[in-house]
Image (cartoon, grey):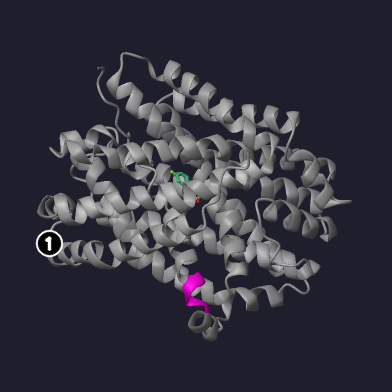
Amino acid sequence: MSERETWATRLGFILASVGSAVGLGNIWRFPFQTAENGGAAFLVVYLVAVLVIGLPALLAEFVIGRRANVNAIDAFDRLDRPNWKVVGAIGVFAGFWTMAYYSVVGGWVIRYVYGSATGAYFGSPRDYFGAISTGPDAVALHLLFMATAVGIVAFGVEDGIEKATKVMVPSIIVLMIGLAGYAVTLPGGGEGYAFFLSPDVSVIADDYRSVVPAAVGQALFSLSLGFSVMITYASYIGDDENLGVDGVSIAAFNTFVGVLAGFVVFPFLFAQGVAVGDAGPGAVFVSVAAALGGLPFGRLLGVVFFGVVLIAALSSAISLLEVVTSYVVDNYEVGRAQTATGLGAVLFVGGVPSAMDIAWLDWFDTVAVNLLLPLAALGVVGFVGWVLAGEATDEIQQGTAGADGLSTVWLWTLRTVVLAAVAASLYLGVRELTAPPL
Ligand code: PFF
């Protein structure tokens, strides 16, 4: 085995993790989850879920990764708990599974960047989406997206992922702030802010059974938890790093971009009178595209908006690919570039059904988010909380002088609230699973 790679800088690690966290989940999934689950009320529950469930779970993955210093499966061996390897394996499998269809959506986004430039979808956004989302073109763009992700991962942790995300994450933030600034000027956008920002507490009281699990699921997915990404990324950092501060920064950045996406999407939609509840995999594409058609500078805005979505999707996709690549590179005598290419080829084939039929894409997504994610997260949280226990608090205290009290609070939060919330998400998620659309 060759010398294991590391991040060049602490900022590099933080930006790569933010790059993974900020993705389609923030810009596409978050606004529509908000729309479907009562608007501002959902925002409040989501913010609480990030703080109370997402952040402790993120730190749990960091603890495993940094303590073991190896890929997410062998980590459990390294921590002398080989039976728990299955948890890592589920996470790695979940990442592999997700990447196959995430890349198809990435292909749609590429299509929308140049579709915006030519105004292709302005006439009939719904028909346009229907026409481009499946079929040979969708397969070709899925291949292009996958090949780009492979290209970055092939260059390695420092020269590929770190360098790429150092440019990508600041661009996402600057462009989103620009779009949000533009949105403020829209006549009629005010209602959008009201919808997003004035919580109707009765929604939480009446619908907590659906709002709470949706918010917990969104918090986990959005922080890239349960797919072994944060375990893998943390395996490339040094022992003197303050995990608590890193975790808080990453969660804060990620939430900031999600909220910022709300500040863009809702005024856009309300200004154009487009229905916010129009959900499903086509949501952002159909509704935002419909809104863009009527806005001044619609084409330019479209290129910028979908450009941001593309960068965000790509920086998440490379993290998914890295999880598996890291496992193979750690275990076999294969180079990183060959590994990434070989995996990319398999993933490309795995994504073809989703690129041919949207029912497959929907099914892959549901299995990932309702089953694989909470299952792996449950394993991680249970393992760190109850099995690693004292070792976990030791680990988190390294580089975090004087935080003994906080680390105990963290451990008990993991053991109780987080474990219960993730178990409940798993239970509710599994009940919604359906058979594959054969
Ligand atoms: N966090 C990403 C998003 O919000 O789009 C999605 C994601 C990426 C989930 C990577 C899991 C993951 F491992």
**Magenta span of residues:** 207-211
Q: Residues within 10 Å of mark 1 (few under 14, many from 20)?
A: few
Residue 368, horizontal then vertical, whole percent: 48, 46
Element marked by disc 1: loop
Residue lying at the far bottom in this picture: please name it.
202
**Magenta residue check for 306:** no
Q: Quadrant of the C terminus?
A: top right
Residue 73, horizontal then vertical, whole percent: 28, 34
- Residue under circle 1? 402
Q: From this viewpoint, is residue 406 visible?
A: yes
**Magenta residue check for 209:** yes
Residue lying at 42% horizontally and 53% vertically, measured from the top left: 223
Q: Amino acid at mark 1?
A: Gly
Residue lying at 63% horizontally and 30% vertically, measured from the top left: 352
Which picture quadrant has residue 51?
A: bottom left
Does 254 sit above or below residue 16?
below
Does 93 sit above or below residue 410?
above
Q: Nearer the viewer, residue 64 or 178?
A: 64
Q: Nearer the viewer, residue 163 or 421?
A: 421
Which picture quadrant has residue 120?
A: top right
Residue 243, horizontal then vertical, whole percent: 25, 51
